[in-house]
Image (cartoon, grey):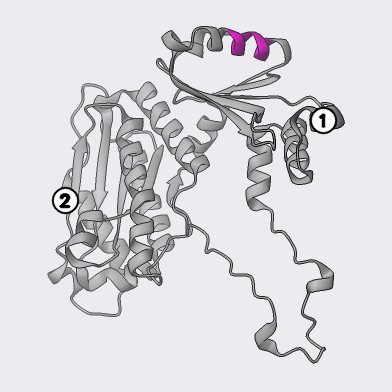
Amino acid sequence: MDILKVYPSGRVSACRRKKFNLQASSRVYALSEQQEWDSNQVHLHGFETAIAAKNALKTPIPLGLSSVANLSTPSETCTKRIKTARGGKGISSFARQRVKDAATILEKKYGREQLSFITHTIPDHAIEYVHSNWEKILANLRRRYVRALQSSGLSEEMVMVSEYQESRFRETGKAVLHLHIVLVGRKKYGHWRRDCEYYKEHWRECCEEYSNQSEESEKWNAATRVESIRKSCANYLGKYMSKGVRAISDVLAVNPNAFIPSSWHVLTQRLRTAVKRAIRHYEGKAASQLFEWLEASATELLKFNRYIKIPTTDGRGLIVGWFGELRDSSLFDSVA
């Protein structure tokens, strides 16, 4: 492997970036034309870049099969491409990884004892206007919390994750979002700077900015919880993200018109930058040596590891990448 990446949460990925002989590979592995193109992109740009580009690629309809507007073809026969709404498949694997990395950085930097885990829900009467202004409400809430943290002398780093409320959906059939937030709630060995009522009031005010009804505050009965984090922060958020991915298919199966946010997570800019800087990149000989070491010591060093293959007509498959997860996410902190 020519390139290896180690993420703050302990995720590791490896792939080949160098060119290889496609004709020779085709003879050995009997690749189709599409598989040759896929493998070429992987080896040229790396596995993650190639997969991201492939997922974003929109294959155009061939010109010879297109329905031209000024022809006598009935409009009913025109080919229509249905575009999946952004966020329609739930939080992406890339976003999940970024959220887990952000949570890991917060935990390593401040310790679990300084972090607050906040959950905001939506009351029944406010579902429609809160959903229709979800992104604006989250942006407003983030600005409020950033100012509050700064005024308290705390870090403004914060991660937000949206999720469908599964228990509410099972009980009522309503697809309602709720919000999870992880932020620094106190200084080391200090008192909690804000209580639950403070966060609840800000949430209510942000939501009611978009309400046309009067006296909303009198019937605002949405729950807000503020908890400490006893176990891994990344696993804590990971549990909710996994539930969210499963829930969205159930929700859309019952209600195809259910509200879907365009983004399922929010990171403050400072934390986003910290995540990018914390990803370790190794190339060439260093990457090959580290990969061989990880592969040889997989049982001791890794929770799991998988090879990524392109299927071939002879059934053997062509290995184009590899990924795994370290048992100790700080293992590479001392590796140059």
| In this picture, residue 96 sits left or right of residue 184 | right
The secondary element bearing badge 1 is classed as helix
Residues packed near mark 2 inside 10 Å, few (<14), some (14 to 19) or many (20 plus):
few
Q: Residue at x 64, y 33 (%)?
A: 315
User: Which range of residues does the magenta coloring cover?
Assistant: 286-292
Q: Quadrant of residue 104?
A: top left
Task: Say which residue label 2 marks.
Answer: 197
Tag 2 secondary structure = helix
What is the distance, in whole Å, between disc 1 and disc 2 at their CAs? 68 Å
Q: Nearer the viewer, residue 200 or 173?
A: 173
Amino acid type, mark 1: Arg
Q: Which residue is mark 1?
A: 27
Which residue is found at the position 14% from the left and 63% from the top? 221
Q: Contact (CB < 8 A) between labels 1 and 2? A: no
Residue 314: percent from left, percent from top: 69, 33
**Where is residue 125 shown, x and y percent of the image?**
21, 73
